[in-house]
Image (cartoon, rainbow, N blue to C red):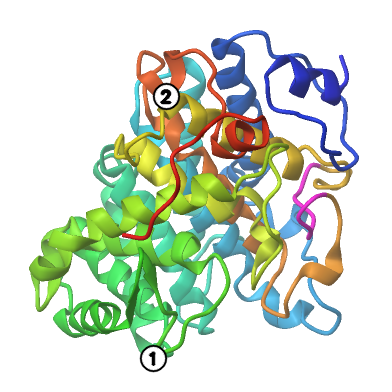
Amino acid sequence: MDRRRFLQGSGLLMAAGVPRMEASPIVDSVGDVRRRWVMYLEKTAGPVLTALSERRLKVVMPVESKPGQEASRRQCTYLEALGRTLSGIAPWLESGSETDLRKRYCGLAREAIAAGVDPASADAMPFGATSQTVVDAAFLGLGILRAPKELADKLPAKVKAQLIEGLKKTRVIKPPVNNWLLFAATVEATLERLGAEWERGPVEVALQKHKDWYVGDGVYGDGPQFHADYYDSFVIHPLLRAVLETPVGKVGVGPELAKVEGERAMRYAAIQERMIACDGTWPVVGRSITYRCGAFHLLADSALREELPEGVKPAQVRGALTAAMEVSLGAAGSYDEDGWLAIGLAGHQPALGETYISTGSLYLCLEAFLPLGLGADKPFWKDASAKWTAQKVWGGEDVVADHAL
């Protein structure tokens, strides 16, 4: 069954065209949709975790980047792949779903962490060696915060100690005054969860600055200025919420910010749901567009939390996210011939990548998979298919108008 028929059978495709696609099986039921998500999870996360568990990631993973950037990207791309993969699949690892497969991936994840933090490993990752490593130490930390039982409590003592040492090494990096402040704060929150000493200063600064940078209607500036991109979803809301929920997040303006962040995140989730077009595409705007469906990190996080905006049904978010995965990950050329992600949004489009983008960066797409942490008995998975907002409006339905927060 070709991909167009799959989308038509699932109610995901209207009259609009779709990018060139690989063939895929038809999805006849809600259960099949979940299986499709798990298939993409395996296809994407599997090569990273398997190679790391064998301590062969640096041998087998390609490093695609802008010409001339390969050497610098090799210093951080492997940590990018590990951190971004685990932060996206962590809720699933922590769940009780797909028992045998999930248990196997939990084991692979712990072996992957061990491979990355062991100084004697062929895949040892140089925490603190470049500024980019604080970013992906934070994504690794986010994964640990999302799956503390599997990725913290079950780590061998030696691995946990090496992980703590690696995270601490990123403190030498002074983050720029923008969304990067949240990476430093997330590292400190992770250290606290691992039972290590944490530093108050980076957390207080990150929370205070983001309080100051709120511009309204669920949107934060990326620093003092507003940026037209997806960073409120890629980074700001998800990491801000994660930090605020930890003991670390209670310092400074944390309690004050925590009172309003939930409402702000919900509003931005409403905006995100409306940005997904009838065919699953979305505006190609701003930096880091090659993170593909990871653009909907915040919407996926809100679905996982079961904190969706009023009038937005879990099933319509399931449909919208499925369509976004299909048009990006399902596009021909999105993976190379060996199964590694290639730079692009809908296929292999290297010109879309900035100088800081390399193969490991692309695994942020897995943030869209957060709802796999919900059991199959939850409304997100068990409810019948529902049209999302774009499909309703462009299909002629009378939909309540959108309004600012």
Seen from the viewer's position, the closer of residues 228 and 394 is 394
Q: CA distance from mark 2 to mark 1?
A: 40 Å
Seen from the viewer's position, the closer of residues 284 and 164 is 284
On screen, residue 4 versus residue 238, left or right, reads right
Q: Which mark is residue 380?
A: 2
Q: How many marks?
A: 2
- For residue 374, what is the image quadrant? top left
Identity, as a three-letter code, of the amino acid under mark 1:
Lys
**For the residue labelled by badge 2, is the local secondary structure a helix, a strand or a loop?**
helix
Q: Residue at x 87, y 32 (%)?
A: 22
Q: Residue at x 83, y 18 (%)?
A: 5
Residue 159 can be seen, yes or no: no
Residue 216, relative to residue 383: is it above or below? below
> Which residue is farthest top?
28
Q: Residue at x 30, y 39 (%)?
A: 305
Residue 199, relative to residue 109: is it above or below? below
Q: Is residue 238 magenta?
A: no
Residues at marks 2 and 1 touching, judged by CB atoms closer than 8 Å = no
**For the residue labelled by badge 1, is the local secondary structure a helix, a strand or a loop?**
loop
On screen, residue 141 versus residue 258, left or right, reads right
Q: Which region of the structure is painted magenta? A: 339-346
Identity, as a three-letter code, of the amino acid under mark 2:
Phe
Of mark 2 and mark 1, the one earlier in the sequence is: 1
On screen, residue 2 versus residue 298, left or right, reads right
Residue 170, relative to residue 22: is it above or below? below
Residue 10 can be seen, yes or no: yes
Q: Which mark is residue 174?
A: 1
Q: Residue at x 39, y 50 (%)?
A: 143
How far across and how far down the image is residue 84, in percent? Answer: 52, 55
- Name the dominant secondary structure of the magenta segment: loop
Q: Which mark is residue 89?
A: none
